[in-house]
Each structure stands twice: as structure tokens, then as C-alpha cells.
Amino acid sequence: MPVGNNNTEFNSVAGVRLASICCGIKRDKDDLVLLEFAEGSHTVGMFTRNLFAAAPVIVGKRHLQASSPRYFLINSGNANAGVGDAGLMDALACCKALASLTGVPEAAVLPFSTGVIGERLPVGKIVSGLERIVAQLDSEHWLLAAKGIMTTDTRPKIATRQVEIQGKIVTITGITKGAGMIQPNMATMLSYVATDIGASTTTLQQCLGLAVNQSFNRITVDSDTSTNDSSMLTATGLSGVNVDEDPVALSIFQGLLDEVCLELAQGIIRDAEGATKFVAVVVNNGASSADCLDVAYAIANSPLMKTAIHASDANWGRIVMAVGKAGVDLDINKLDIYLGDTQLMSAGQKQATYTEAQGAAVMAEEEITITIDLNAGEHSETVWTCDLSQEYVRINADYRS
């Protein structure tokens, strides 16, 4: 079961229409999603650094450099990855068919795929559904789109914010999918955020980079980076607010974008495959951000630590083990460790007043914070993760069955 509550509310974004249909890739579930953006919109993105980047990632990056996207064509159930040049031809065929139908340049269509790796994309099924999905485009279909991009997700992930800037209402709404194969090395499995502010692509790229680095680049389920990771930000400009030359407006927008991306990223962890616990690993007072992240990920990705969390076992020796293997030059005699508000280690030794019952009480909670104080500097980082359960093994063992 997912951890915590799930938002399904959204605000529509001027200049954005969406649709979701079943074209037969996943039989009886929606598996094809279309996003349409008003002419004049600006789009930026961040993509996987996996050397086996999927065909839609390669094509999408090329198209993004050549044109201002008018459409995102997204299929679930098939990743179009690991099939060589045939994957590129298949992705391009889908883009060409949609471009012909809608009267836009081929490069104005960005393809995205998620699902099973190593199988040819069913181009015929996708192309046969294009007329139907274009006819269903609507500004209110955000939640339907969030459901349509799901694979092993158990619930849609959507986040939205509205605020007044320069006397006008500005909206940001985003959706994402992801539940496994999650330790994004740039973004998340698939994430789409749209806003009605106006901004140059240079400004948008800077904003997205800042937001992603503190959200999608701070989560892990299983330490695996997908072949298809893509995180996109589109600004339609239809609110009448332009942030390029207004530092105050830009700061407000950045704050809202940060919130939306963090909510979406944490939503992935709350709905991670087989997850029963939502865990924040906080590392404070490190000599560098890199040191803090190395320690945080060493804990967050430790199978021994994650199984202990699943069992609500306050086996703090596993935390110490993970810190020690992180490869960071530390003075262990300065190390303080906390489970929630309970201190279990002080100056590198077990806290004198700590009891197993105190630790067990924290570990029994659905949401857990593990805090490591390195007492070595002024940098801090947080990584969000989950437990490792038998259900995770079952889901991934049966994924292609």
C-alpha cells in the first residue's frame, strides 16, 4: 500500500490541453497520453544520463533543439529501449503521424515511452489511436493524463500551485510517474510540469535545473537509473506575467516550481513498488554537499537498512555500517545519529540513555527520519527513500510475466 495521502486536485494551465486513451498496448488500461501546448510556448527538459538512453529520449532531445514543441506523445507499457536503430525509426514514425494529423512540423512532436525494455514499439496501435486522442484533448484532463502514464504505479501523482504575481494569477501544475527503477541521475522516470508564466528557455532551464536537483535528484527506491528518465517544463506565457526581467517574480516562481517538483518526487517514494515506509535521510554539517549525499545514499540504498526499516527493526548498527562504507573521510568520533527525535549515537558511541524500545517506536511509524550529523562542516542534504519489502521482489519478478 502507498504511504500517506495522495493529492488528486489540480488547476488547469492556460494554453495546455491533455488527453488519455487506451490504444491496446496494455489491453484494458489507458496507455497513450497527449499533451498539447499553445503556439509560442517555451519548453526545456532534463534527460537520463544512462548510456542506454531509450530511442524517445534521443529523438526528443534532437527535436527539442530544433523546434518549440507543440505536442508530447507519451505511451506506457513499452519503453522503446534496447532495440537499436529500429527504436529511433519507430519513435520518428509516431512523431511524423501526429505531425501530419495536426499540421505541425515533425520536430514539434516530442515522443516519450515507459514500460518494458527490449521490445519493439507497437507503432500501428499508437498511430491508429491518434485521431481519437486528438479529438479528446481538453484543458481539464490533467488527472486522466496522470493515470495514463502509470506503469507499476498504484496511484496518479499530480501537484499544483497558484499565486498572484504582478496582480495576476499564475498557475503551475505537474504530473509524474515512477515507482521502481528510481535513482534518477537528472530527473525522474517521466515528469511533465506546465505553467502559464512567460520566460525564455534560458530562464526556464535554470529554474528546472535548480528544482530537479533538490527533488527528483534526491530520491531513490532501488538505486537504478532508468533508460527513459525525462523531466520537462513548459511555459505558455498566457498569464501575462513574464519573469525574465523581474527578480521578485522569478524568485516566487522558482519557489513554486521547487514545491511542485518536490511534491511529485516524494509522491514517487510514497508509491514506490512494495513500499510501506516513507523515509527521509538527513545528513547535516558535512564538509561538502557531495559528502552529505554520499552518506545519505549509502544509507538509503543499503538493502540491509531498507529491510530493517520494513521490519520496524531499530538495528542502528546497519546505519553505522552504511555511513562507514560511504567512502567519505570522516572523524567517526564526531558522529551523532538520530532516529526521529531520539538520539542513538553521540560522538561516535551509543548514546548512554538510548533504549531499544525508543528506537523501535520510531521505526514502527509510517514516516521515519534518520539524521546523521557529521560535525565536519556547514553543508546539509536530504535524500528520500522507502523500505524494501517482499512485495517489491514480487512486482519485479513478475514484471514481464
Image (cartoon, helix red, strand yellow):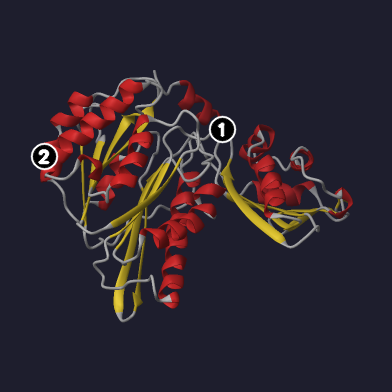
Query: At x 65% / y 32%, what residue is drawn?
Result: 303
Task: Return the x and y of residue 316 as percentages of the image width and height.
Answer: 76, 43
Q: Are marks 2 and 1 in contact (CB under 8 Å)?
A: no
Nearer the observer, 263 or 172? 172
Secondary structure category for the residue under label 1: loop
What residue would you read off at disc 2? Answer: 101
Tell me where residue 150 sits by quadrant.
Answer: top left
Task: Return the x and y of residue 232 as percentages of the image width and height.
Answer: 37, 49
| Residue 279, visible in the rendered structure | no
Residue 311 is marked as none
Task: Return the x and y of residue 147 as percentages of the image width and height.
Answer: 30, 43
What residue would you read off at disc 1? Answer: 389
Question: Please, is residue 284 above or below residue 119 in the view?
Answer: below
Q: Is residue 173 left or right of residue 377?
A: left
Question: Please, is residue 183 above or below residue 42 in the view?
Answer: above
Q: Is residue 57 left or right of residue 109?
A: right
Secondary structure category for the residue under label 2: helix
The residue type indicated by label 1 comes to: Ser
The residue type indicated by label 2 comes to: Leu
The residues tagged by marks 2 and 1 sit, at their Cα atoms, a distance apart of: 46 Å
